[in-house]
Image (tube, rainbow, N blue to C red):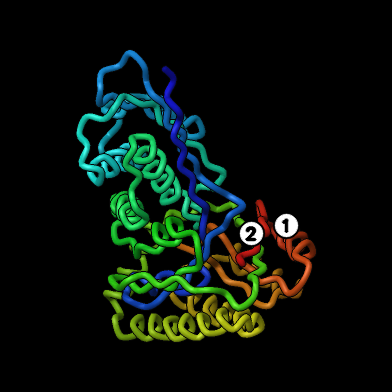
Amino acid sequence: MSMPAGTGAAPGKVILFGEHAAVYGQPAIAVPVQQVAARALVRPLFNAPSGRIRIQAPEVGVDTELDQLDGQHPLAAAVRFTLEAMGVQHPLAVTIKVSSTIPVAAGLGSGAAVSVAIARGLSGFLGHPLADEQVSAVAFEVEKIHHGTPSGIDNTVITYNQPVYFIKGQPLQTFRLGAPLNLVIADTGVPSPTKITVGDVRAAWQAEPARYETLFAEIGEITKAARRALEQGDMGTVGELMNQNHALLQQLNVSSPELDALVAAARGAGALGAKLSGGGRGGNLIALAAGDPAALQTALQAAGASATLHTVVA
Protein backbone atom coordinates (compact mmCIF):
# COMPACT_ATOMS: atom_id res chain seq x y z
CA MET A 1 0.00 0.00 0.00
CA SER A 2 1.50 3.36 -0.93
CA MET A 3 0.52 6.47 0.92
CA PRO A 4 0.11 9.81 -0.82
CA ALA A 5 2.50 12.62 -0.07
CA GLY A 6 1.27 15.78 1.64
CA THR A 7 2.21 19.19 0.36
CA GLY A 8 2.05 22.62 1.92
CA ALA A 9 2.83 25.85 0.13
CA ALA A 10 2.97 29.51 1.09
CA PRO A 11 3.73 32.74 -0.83
CA GLY A 12 6.22 35.43 0.06
CA LYS A 13 5.10 38.88 1.22
CA VAL A 14 6.10 42.52 1.27
CA ILE A 15 5.15 45.18 3.76
CA LEU A 16 3.71 48.14 1.87
CA PHE A 17 3.34 50.53 4.82
CA GLY A 18 3.98 50.70 8.54
CA GLU A 19 7.03 48.53 9.19
CA HIS A 20 8.74 49.21 12.56
CA ALA A 21 5.83 51.38 13.74
CA ALA A 22 3.70 48.20 13.75
CA VAL A 23 5.74 46.88 16.69
CA TYR A 24 4.44 49.88 18.70
CA GLY A 25 0.75 49.39 17.98
CA GLN A 26 0.44 51.36 14.73
CA PRO A 27 -1.27 49.77 11.70
CA ALA A 28 0.68 48.15 8.89
CA ILE A 29 -0.30 46.91 5.44
CA ALA A 30 1.21 43.85 3.78
CA VAL A 31 0.45 41.99 0.56
CA PRO A 32 1.32 38.48 -0.66
CA VAL A 33 3.92 37.98 -3.39
CA GLN A 34 2.90 34.99 -5.52
CA GLN A 35 6.05 34.91 -7.68
CA VAL A 36 8.03 33.32 -4.85
CA ALA A 37 6.99 30.51 -2.53
CA ALA A 38 8.02 28.01 0.14
CA ARG A 39 6.98 24.36 -0.11
CA ALA A 40 6.99 21.40 2.24
CA LEU A 41 6.61 17.86 0.86
CA VAL A 42 5.73 15.25 3.49
CA ARG A 43 6.20 11.54 2.79
CA PRO A 44 5.97 8.43 4.96
CA LEU A 45 9.27 7.21 6.40
CA PHE A 46 8.94 3.44 6.12
CA ASN A 47 10.38 0.94 8.62
CA ALA A 48 10.88 3.67 11.21
CA PRO A 49 9.29 3.90 14.68
CA SER A 50 6.36 6.29 15.09
CA GLY A 51 7.39 9.76 16.12
CA ARG A 52 10.52 9.73 13.97
CA ILE A 53 10.73 12.78 11.71
CA ARG A 54 13.47 13.46 9.20
CA ILE A 55 13.85 17.02 7.94
CA GLN A 56 15.52 17.76 4.64
CA ALA A 57 16.20 21.32 3.52
CA PRO A 58 18.88 21.00 0.85
CA GLU A 59 19.11 24.78 0.29
CA VAL A 60 20.32 25.30 3.87
CA GLY A 61 22.25 22.04 4.14
CA VAL A 62 19.88 20.30 6.57
CA ASP A 63 19.27 16.54 6.30
CA THR A 64 18.77 15.19 9.78
CA GLU A 65 16.46 13.66 12.35
CA LEU A 66 14.22 16.16 14.14
CA ASP A 67 15.60 15.24 17.58
CA GLN A 68 19.14 16.01 16.39
CA LEU A 69 18.22 19.65 15.71
CA ASP A 70 18.34 22.31 18.41
CA GLY A 71 14.80 22.98 19.65
CA GLN A 72 15.26 26.64 18.67
CA HIS A 73 16.02 25.73 15.06
CA PRO A 74 13.21 27.23 12.94
CA LEU A 75 12.46 24.00 11.06
CA ALA A 76 12.36 21.97 14.28
CA ALA A 77 10.24 24.61 16.02
CA ALA A 78 7.72 24.67 13.13
CA VAL A 79 7.32 20.89 13.33
CA ARG A 80 7.02 20.91 17.11
CA PHE A 81 4.44 23.71 17.24
CA THR A 82 2.42 22.03 14.45
CA LEU A 83 2.27 18.73 16.38
CA GLU A 84 1.31 20.63 19.56
CA ALA A 85 -1.50 22.43 17.70
CA MET A 86 -2.74 19.03 16.48
CA GLY A 87 -2.44 17.47 19.94
CA VAL A 88 -0.26 14.67 18.50
CA GLN A 89 2.83 13.41 20.32
CA HIS A 90 3.98 10.42 18.28
CA PRO A 91 2.90 10.87 14.67
CA LEU A 92 3.49 8.44 11.88
CA ALA A 93 7.17 8.52 10.88
CA VAL A 94 7.70 11.00 8.05
CA THR A 95 10.26 12.83 5.96
CA ILE A 96 9.62 16.55 5.46
CA LYS A 97 11.44 18.11 2.53
CA VAL A 98 11.47 21.90 2.51
CA SER A 99 12.30 24.11 -0.47
CA SER A 100 11.87 27.81 -1.10
CA THR A 101 12.35 30.34 -3.86
CA ILE A 102 12.00 33.22 -1.36
CA PRO A 103 15.31 35.02 -0.74
CA VAL A 104 16.38 34.90 2.92
CA ALA A 105 16.79 38.06 5.04
CA ALA A 106 15.31 40.24 2.31
CA GLY A 107 12.02 41.20 3.98
CA LEU A 108 10.00 38.78 1.86
CA GLY A 109 8.86 36.63 4.77
CA SER A 110 10.93 33.53 3.99
CA GLY A 111 10.92 32.32 7.60
CA ALA A 112 7.18 32.64 8.10
CA ALA A 113 6.45 31.10 4.69
CA VAL A 114 8.54 28.01 5.50
CA SER A 115 6.70 27.62 8.83
CA VAL A 116 3.30 27.98 7.12
CA ALA A 117 4.26 25.42 4.45
CA ILE A 118 5.41 22.93 7.12
CA ALA A 119 2.27 23.41 9.25
CA ARG A 120 0.03 22.89 6.21
CA GLY A 121 1.96 19.99 4.73
CA LEU A 122 2.43 18.04 7.96
CA SER A 123 -1.06 18.54 9.40
CA GLY A 124 -2.64 17.75 6.02
CA PHE A 125 -0.56 14.59 5.59
CA LEU A 126 -1.47 13.40 9.08
CA GLY A 127 -5.16 13.82 8.26
CA HIS A 128 -5.91 16.80 10.51
CA PRO A 129 -5.34 19.91 8.40
CA LEU A 130 -5.00 22.92 10.68
CA ALA A 131 -7.34 25.90 10.15
CA ASP A 132 -5.75 29.14 8.87
CA GLU A 133 -5.92 30.65 12.34
CA GLN A 134 -3.92 27.71 13.78
CA VAL A 135 -1.41 27.76 10.90
CA SER A 136 -0.83 31.47 11.48
CA ALA A 137 -0.38 30.88 15.23
CA VAL A 138 2.23 28.16 14.59
CA ALA A 139 4.23 30.47 12.34
CA PHE A 140 3.93 33.30 14.89
CA GLU A 141 5.42 31.09 17.63
CA VAL A 142 8.40 30.32 15.39
CA GLU A 143 8.78 34.04 14.54
CA LYS A 144 8.93 34.85 18.27
CA ILE A 145 12.02 32.67 18.66
CA HIS A 146 13.81 34.49 15.86
CA HIS A 147 12.57 38.07 15.96
CA GLY A 148 12.09 38.63 19.67
CA THR A 149 9.00 40.85 19.38
CA PRO A 150 7.51 40.24 15.92
CA SER A 151 4.42 42.22 14.96
CA GLY A 152 2.64 39.12 13.61
CA ILE A 153 2.18 40.60 10.17
CA ASP A 154 4.34 38.10 8.24
CA ASN A 155 2.58 34.97 9.45
CA THR A 156 -0.82 36.66 8.95
CA VAL A 157 -0.50 37.87 5.36
CA ILE A 158 1.29 34.69 4.26
CA THR A 159 -1.30 32.37 5.82
CA TYR A 160 -4.36 34.25 4.52
CA ASN A 161 -2.74 35.07 1.16
CA GLN A 162 -4.49 38.40 0.59
CA PRO A 163 -3.85 42.07 1.48
CA VAL A 164 -3.88 42.55 5.23
CA TYR A 165 -4.42 45.61 7.41
CA PHE A 166 -2.89 44.72 10.70
CA ILE A 167 -2.76 46.20 14.19
CA LYS A 168 -0.85 44.17 16.75
CA GLY A 169 -3.14 42.44 19.23
CA GLN A 170 -6.32 43.25 17.26
CA PRO A 171 -8.33 40.95 15.00
CA LEU A 172 -6.91 40.74 11.52
CA GLN A 173 -8.58 42.65 8.68
CA THR A 174 -8.21 41.61 5.07
CA PHE A 175 -9.27 44.05 2.39
CA ARG A 176 -9.70 44.32 -1.36
CA LEU A 177 -7.70 46.52 -3.71
CA GLY A 178 -9.65 48.94 -5.92
CA ALA A 179 -7.13 48.38 -8.74
CA PRO A 180 -4.21 45.98 -9.27
CA LEU A 181 -0.98 46.96 -7.56
CA ASN A 182 1.90 46.87 -10.01
CA LEU A 183 5.00 46.45 -7.83
CA VAL A 184 8.67 46.06 -8.55
CA ILE A 185 10.71 44.63 -5.70
CA ALA A 186 14.46 45.25 -5.81
CA ASP A 187 16.99 43.53 -3.57
CA THR A 188 19.95 45.58 -2.35
CA GLY A 189 21.94 42.36 -2.00
CA VAL A 190 22.67 43.38 1.60
CA PRO A 191 21.18 40.87 4.07
CA SER A 192 18.93 42.50 6.64
CA PRO A 193 18.35 40.54 9.86
CA THR A 194 15.10 42.05 11.15
CA LYS A 195 15.92 41.28 14.78
CA ILE A 196 18.87 43.70 14.72
CA THR A 197 17.06 46.69 13.20
CA VAL A 198 14.03 46.11 15.45
CA GLY A 199 16.36 46.05 18.47
CA ASP A 200 18.12 49.25 17.38
CA VAL A 201 14.79 51.07 16.96
CA ARG A 202 13.72 49.84 20.41
CA ALA A 203 16.92 51.22 21.99
CA ALA A 204 16.43 54.58 20.22
CA TRP A 205 12.77 54.71 21.34
CA GLN A 206 13.80 54.01 24.93
CA ALA A 207 16.36 56.83 24.76
CA GLU A 208 13.99 59.37 23.15
CA PRO A 209 10.42 58.10 23.64
CA ALA A 210 8.58 61.31 22.72
CA ARG A 211 10.45 61.79 19.43
CA TYR A 212 9.97 58.19 18.37
CA GLU A 213 6.31 58.00 19.42
CA THR A 214 5.70 61.01 17.15
CA LEU A 215 7.43 59.32 14.21
CA PHE A 216 5.47 56.09 14.80
CA ALA A 217 2.19 58.03 14.94
CA GLU A 218 3.01 59.84 11.66
CA ILE A 219 3.70 56.48 10.00
CA GLY A 220 0.38 55.24 11.41
CA GLU A 221 -1.51 58.14 9.80
CA ILE A 222 0.17 57.44 6.44
CA THR A 223 -0.82 53.77 6.69
CA LYS A 224 -4.47 54.64 7.43
CA ALA A 225 -4.58 56.98 4.44
CA ALA A 226 -2.89 54.32 2.28
CA ARG A 227 -5.58 51.76 3.04
CA ARG A 228 -8.25 54.18 1.80
CA ALA A 229 -6.24 54.95 -1.36
CA LEU A 230 -5.63 51.25 -2.05
CA GLU A 231 -9.32 50.42 -1.63
CA GLN A 232 -10.20 53.26 -4.03
CA GLY A 233 -7.53 52.20 -6.53
CA ASP A 234 -5.91 55.66 -6.32
CA MET A 235 -2.35 54.63 -7.15
CA GLY A 236 -1.02 58.19 -7.46
CA THR A 237 -1.86 58.78 -3.80
CA VAL A 238 -0.48 55.36 -2.83
CA GLY A 239 2.85 56.27 -4.45
CA GLU A 240 3.02 59.66 -2.72
CA LEU A 241 2.31 57.99 0.64
CA MET A 242 5.09 55.45 -0.04
CA ASN A 243 7.50 58.36 -0.52
CA GLN A 244 6.37 59.94 2.76
CA ASN A 245 6.69 56.63 4.59
CA HIS A 246 10.27 56.21 3.32
CA ALA A 247 11.22 59.68 4.57
CA LEU A 248 10.00 58.73 8.06
CA LEU A 249 11.90 55.41 7.92
CA GLN A 250 15.02 57.45 7.13
CA GLN A 251 14.32 59.41 10.30
CA LEU A 252 14.04 56.11 12.22
CA ASN A 253 17.58 55.43 10.92
CA VAL A 254 16.64 52.14 9.23
CA SER A 255 17.42 53.13 5.64
CA SER A 256 20.91 52.85 4.10
CA PRO A 257 22.91 54.46 1.27
CA GLU A 258 22.11 51.45 -0.96
CA LEU A 259 18.37 51.71 -0.28
CA ASP A 260 18.34 55.48 -0.76
CA ALA A 261 20.17 55.12 -4.10
CA LEU A 262 17.56 52.61 -5.30
CA VAL A 263 14.71 54.86 -4.13
CA ALA A 264 16.19 57.75 -6.13
CA ALA A 265 16.67 55.54 -9.21
CA ALA A 266 13.08 54.25 -9.03
CA ARG A 267 11.61 57.73 -8.77
CA GLY A 268 13.91 58.93 -11.57
CA ALA A 269 12.60 56.10 -13.78
CA GLY A 270 8.99 57.21 -13.28
CA ALA A 271 7.86 55.13 -10.32
CA LEU A 272 4.77 56.58 -8.60
CA GLY A 273 6.52 55.99 -5.28
CA ALA A 274 9.31 53.96 -3.69
CA LYS A 275 10.38 52.96 -0.18
CA LEU A 276 12.29 50.35 1.72
CA SER A 277 10.23 47.34 2.80
CA GLY A 278 10.75 45.34 5.96
CA GLY A 279 13.58 45.67 8.44
CA GLY A 280 15.67 48.08 6.41
CA ARG A 281 19.44 48.75 6.30
CA GLY A 282 19.47 46.28 3.43
CA GLY A 283 16.94 43.82 2.13
CA ASN A 284 14.34 45.14 -0.27
CA LEU A 285 13.01 48.25 -1.85
CA ILE A 286 9.51 48.35 -3.32
CA ALA A 287 8.52 50.67 -6.16
CA LEU A 288 5.05 51.29 -7.57
CA ALA A 289 5.19 51.14 -11.37
CA ALA A 290 3.10 53.62 -13.36
CA GLY A 291 3.10 51.51 -16.52
CA ASP A 292 5.44 48.92 -17.99
CA PRO A 293 7.64 47.69 -15.14
CA ALA A 294 10.53 46.64 -17.42
CA ALA A 295 12.09 50.13 -17.60
CA LEU A 296 11.84 50.41 -13.83
CA GLN A 297 13.56 47.04 -13.35
CA THR A 298 16.34 48.04 -15.77
CA ALA A 299 16.91 51.33 -13.92
CA LEU A 300 17.04 49.57 -10.55
CA GLN A 301 19.53 46.98 -11.81
CA ALA A 302 21.68 49.79 -13.24
CA ALA A 303 21.56 51.49 -9.81
CA GLY A 304 22.96 48.38 -8.10
CA ALA A 305 20.00 46.08 -7.31
CA SER A 306 21.22 42.48 -7.08
CA ALA A 307 17.84 41.19 -8.29
CA THR A 308 14.44 42.57 -9.21
CA LEU A 309 11.04 40.97 -9.23
CA HIS A 310 7.79 42.21 -10.77
CA THR A 311 4.57 41.22 -9.01
CA VAL A 312 0.96 42.22 -9.56
CA VAL A 313 -1.24 42.12 -6.49
CA ALA A 314 -4.87 41.95 -7.59
Residue 271 in the image: state x and y as whole percent: 71, 74
Residue 160 in the image: state x and y as whole percent: 44, 60
Residue 172 in the image: state x and y as whole percent: 36, 70
Crowd rating for badge 2 (residues with CA inside 10 Å; few <14, some 14–19, many 20+): many
Q: Is residue 87 above or below residue 95?
A: below
Residue 220, disc: none
Q: Are marks 1 and 2 in contact (CB under 8 Å)?
A: yes
Residue 186, disc: 2
Q: Nearer the viewer, residue 258 or 227?
A: 227
Q: Nearer the viewer, residue 188 or 97?
A: 97
Amino acid type of the residue that numbered disc 1 sits on in the rendered structure:
Gln
Which secondary structure lies at badge 1? helix
Residue at 61 percent across and 56 percent down: it is 187
Residue 301, disc: 1
Q: Is residue 276 left or right of residue 308?
A: left
Residue 128 in the image: state x and y as whole percent: 32, 41
Which secondary structure lies at badge 2? strand
Q: Is residue 201 above or below residue 105?
A: below
Q: CA distance from mark 1 to mark 2?
A: 8 Å
Q: Is residue 218 above or below residue 108?
A: below
Image quadrant containing the N terminus: top left
Q: Is residue 144 left or right of residue 111?
A: left
Q: Is residue 298 left or right of residue 272?
A: right
